[in-house]
Image: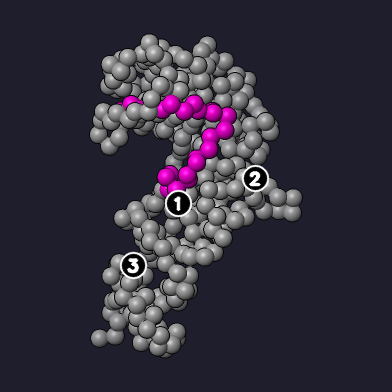
Amino acid sequence: MHQVIKYIDECPPVKGFRRSAIYDLHRNTCQFIPNSMFDILKNIEGKSIEEVSLEFGSDPIIDEYVEFLVSNEYILLCDAEDYLNFPSLSFEFAGPSTISSACLAFEHPSSYDLASCINQLENLGCRHFLLIAETVMPIQYFTALLSSFQHSSILSIDIYAKFNPATSLEDIHAFCGNPFRIRSFLQYSAPSDQFIPTGNDGFNAVIFVRQSIDTKKANFQNIQDYFSINMQSYCEAQRTNLFYNKKILIDSKGIISGGQNPSINSVNVNTTSVLDAINAPGFSETWGVNKDLIEVCRECEYRYMCPDDRIPVKCKGGGWKQETECFYNPF
């Protein structure tokens, strides 16, 4: 019976400058392939092995490529009459929330109403929060802050707190055990590094790190540690910026930003609601700057899995670039 090649849509190939990658969105892994294999992949859909051999010549490497793709379940051979029973998968992305995640920095006493901001963001669909305390605070402060959100729709809260020698590990465990959905409690500028998992799936982890945290400039030293290989990230990265899309940042002075330079068109949460801020012209522009629009990034095989936190900058002649060099150079 006549058999043809069907490519598995959940394993899209992504071409880079020197090499390509196959994203296995079902297994959350990726495998590198030569660009020559990518070129073949884009031209074998619906064809038989014989047709592929005729098109690309009787080169033994073609047989090796096909064997590799079949053994890794990136393609399958199916009867020609069954081929049309495999509809193409759509990679369109749409999320129900106006804001998906938020980072809020604050001091004590805070220059803005932190609880009010969290409430506003939750009403906009925000389910994930990172709270960064820039000054030493007692654990009771966080307990009081989050007490009103015990029955909220928030899914996870991460807290970065400046190390407080007066706070015992028992106090932290008791706090994380409350129904606040705490995913991690990290104390920076601590005397030593320590990681203490206390819950399932990484929830309620207590972390101590010696390094300080510059809340005004986050920077991943090795962005590969943060790669996200899954269906949602891949779909989101097709048209949006994987790091900044639907993310809002509020600094310790109350300045709201959505990924652009906070000094540009800055608004303060004390005078402007979060909803009015994100609806302002240009506020969410960075959200839609995906890697295909950015110089260098568009040549990178990692571009649909990389949550790069560098702020893209508009070029004078159009297009986008990054002002700082990435840890990885695709060239």
Q: Is residue 222 magenta?
A: yes
Nearest to the observer: residue 110 or residue 61: 61
Q: Is residue 128 left or right of residue 221?
A: left
Residue depth check, mark 2 versus mark 1: number of the one nearer the observer = 2
Callout 1: helix, strand or loop?
loop
**Residue 261 vertical position relative to residue 108 in the rendered view, above or below:** below
Q: Is residue 182 magenta?
A: no
Q: Which mark is residue 74?
A: 3
Q: Which residue is mark 2?
A: 323
Please say if the residues under marks 2 and 1 sit with CB atoms less than 8 Å apart.
Answer: no
Please say if the residues under marks 3 and 2 sit with CB atoms less than 8 Å apart.
Answer: no
Nearest to the observer: residue 276 or residue 181: 181
Rendered-image quadrant of the C terminus: bottom right
Indicate the amino acid at tag 2. Answer: Glu
Q: Residue at x 57, y 15 (%)?
A: 111
Indicate the amino acid at tag 1. Answer: Met
Q: Main secondary structure of the magenta part?
A: loop
Callout 3: helix, strand or loop?
loop
**Nearer the N terminus, badge 3 or badge 1?**
3
Q: CA distance from mark 2 to mark 1?
A: 20 Å
Q: Is residue 140 left or right of residue 99?
A: left
Q: Which residue is mark 1?
A: 305
**Residue 318 vertical position relative to residue 139 in the rendered view, above or below:** below
Q: Residue at x 44, y 76 (%)?
A: 40
**Nearer the N terminus, badge 2 or badge 1?**
1
Magenta range: 204-227
Please say if the residues under marks 3 and 1 sit with CB atoms less than 8 Å apart.
Answer: no
**Residue 130 vertical position relative to residue 136 in the rendered view, above or below:** below
Indicate the amino acid at tag 3. Answer: Tyr
